[in-house]
Structures are given as structure tokens and as C-alpha cells.
Image: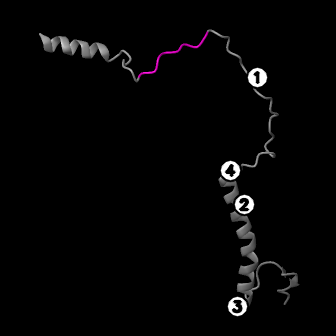
Amino acid sequence: MPNTTRLRTLLLRLPLPAVGRHRAPESRPSASPVQTVPAPRVPALSGEAVGLVHPYLVAHERRQEAQRQRVPRRALLLASHGVGIGPRLIHRVEVGRA
């Protein structure tokens, strides 16, 4: 029977707060009205004003720029082998007129 009593007291203490001299006394705040602070108004940002850009857009622009730089290089390489394709102006010099 003493084991049952001890078990019952342990189970009853689980949902209750702990007691003892190290436990801080409960202090209830006084019933004062809660003051709300209004949120500051911020104007809506347009898409151009936002500094964040989608990474796939940046990658696409980088690929376009790399291809734009690759075309004259390829034309110079092929011109050195006697193949005349590509732009007529390379580095502001007219080439490919035969």
C-alpha cells in the first residue's frame, strides 16, 4: 500500500509546478491596459527599386555576355585558318574583304 500512495503522489505532482525555497514566487502583473504601438507606414517599393534579383536572371545575362564576347574570338580564330565568317569589324578594324 505505501508504494501505491507514493506512486499516486508522484503522478499528482507531475502537472503541478515545483515547490521549494529556490522557486521564485509567482507575481501576477496588475490589470493595466495593453498599449499598442502603431506600425510605421512604409511606401510600397517598385520592382526597379529592389536590390534583389533572381539568380536565374543573372545567370542568363552572364551567358549572353559570354556569348557576345565569344563571337569575335571565334571569328579571329577561324580567320587565322583562312575561313572568313563573322563580323566585318573586329576591334574596329575592317577584316574579311577579299
> In the rendered image, which residue does mark 3 sit on?
81
Q: Specify the amino acid type for callout 1.
A: Pro
Q: Position of residue 44 (x, y in %)?
A: 80, 35
Mark with earlier residue (2, 1): 1
| Circle 1 residues within 10 Å: few <14, some 14–19, many ≥20 | few
Q: Does the magenta stretch include residue 8?
A: no
Seen at 75% across and 49% down, the residue is 51
Q: Which residue corresponds to mark 1?
A: 38
Q: Earlier in the sequence, mark 1 or mark 3?
A: 1
- Spot occupied by residue 77 in the image (x, y as percentages of width and height): 71, 85
- Relative image position of residue 47 (x, y in whole percent): 78, 43
Disc 4: which residue: 54
> Which one is in front, 13 or 36?
13
Residue at the spot x=71%, y=80% of the render? 74
Residue 21 is left or right of residue 74, and the answer is left
Amino acid carrying label 4: it is His
First in residue order: circle 2 vs circle 3: 2
How much space separates mark 1 and mark 3, taking CA atoms?
73 Å
Which numbered disc covers residue 61? 2
Secondary structure predominantly adopted by residues drawn in magenta = loop
Mark closer to the chain start, 4 or 2: 4
